[in-house]
Image (spheres, rainbow, N blue to C red):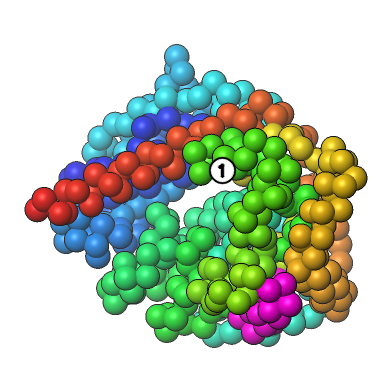
Amino acid sequence: MIFHLDTPADRLLTGRLELVAGWIEDDRPGEPLSLLAGQQRIALIRCQHPGVAGGWLPPGAQGFYGFLPLRELLGSILNGFLTVDVLAGWQVIMRESFRVSPTAAQLAQEYPLNTSTYPVRADHNPFGRSIPPRVVIFPGLSAAGGSSINSLFRFQMYRNGWTFPVLGEANDRGLWEALRVRGFGSNLRWIDGHDCYRAGECLSAPWARVTVLRNPLPRMLTVFNYGRIVHPHEFRFATFEDFLASSEFRRYTQAFELLRIAGRLGTEAEQSDELLYREARIELERCYELVGITELFEETIFLTCLLAEIPAIGMWFRVLSTPKGLQPEDLAEGTRRRAEKALEVDYSLYREARTSFSRLVQTVGFGNELESYKRDSFDRRELPDSYKMAECLRWRQVMTDQRLSSMARERQQTES
């Protein structure tokens, strides 16, 4: 049996909850796969691997994925390494060794994840029941909390034994259609990614899109703070004023991103606020079943659960959180007024979406379950900026590695 790890490809654990995914050439397809670390057994779920449909893996290969909860594994770390046995059934087929980042170990100890599950109950489900349940498609906008939503629902899919595109394969339309032809995910329930907008069009099951809008000026400052750390070669603005004066500022607005990911951004909408607003508003009303609000994050999670018919959900946790940087109160008055003027379309969309969202929450009647979830969310300790910085720099490295790996694979395919 060949066992290959795609992620983390460098065998480095940097988070409190780490995705482990890869592929095997399986000579025991009926045996459950798992990882054994000390006395902790972590189930691995079999899935289709995009490399088979894409032609860069042998036909007999099969994907797998699981999550390593670092807090539960701290006792098995020796000299900074976590060694796990890979099991098929109860037979050890190989051994893997992961380096554990000291920061990750410290955070797992001092800032443990809340691994409880919370019931999602409501007096009224505004979305109605669906048979089979809807697949939720989440083409998230940048700097609106999408990474945290993705991580929460991906982990919930794992907990429930449901399917999602583990390696971002729904972002590649041709690859996704090839996977669907092969019968990808009979229990598919969640799809995320910046380019997964049309992933539902080849599904036989019912599906619905969800997105999240955020207060425009704080969001744009997060775009600026994050861009300077994670994308220094593409995001070359020394000051927020430089960013505001550039043509790129408009391209990072929520309205612009909504139309871009939908493939509906025409030249006129790029230049006209009136047309940009009208087109983005139509997009939200016609193409999204739910438009959540970052500032009402727990309510957004609970409504998404109602839409997807998920009866219980875990506690969300911050992912790719930007360390404290430039804040609205730090801006000069003139700069702030110019930024708010440049964000008028986003403010109009946000105010309308928030009003509709708040009205929807009132009609649902979540009751004590939502209040308990919000209370436990509020009581968490905030992560230190040193960790946030380390996580952003790690993500910068991961994306660079992914680009290099993709280039190497394309070169290999061309040469063959």
Residue drawn 61% across and 60% down? 251
Range of residues picked out in magenta: 272-291
The vertical placement of 262 against 339, above or below, is below
Q: Measured from the top left, where is residue 94 in percent x and y?
A: 25, 35
Residue type at numbered disc 1? Phe
Q: Is residue 245 visible?
A: yes
Which quadrant would residue 209 be assigned to in this image? bottom right
Q: Is residue 105 left or right of residue 29?
A: right
Residue 331: horizontal and vertical position, in percent? 84, 41
Image-based side of 379 in relation to 212, left or right = right
Q: Which picture quadrant has residue 365?
A: bottom right
Nearer to us in this view, 80 or 194: 194
Assign the N terminus to one quadrant of the image.
top left
Which residue ends up furthest to the right in the rendered image? 333
Residue 375 vertical placement versus 141 (above, below): above
Magenta span: predominant SS is helix
Other residues around mark 1 within 10 Å, as few (<14) / some (14–19) / many (≥20): some
Please report the residue visible at 67 percent of the width from the left and 46 percent of the height from the top: 243
Q: Residue at left 67%, top 63%? A: 254
Does residue 25 appear in this view?
no
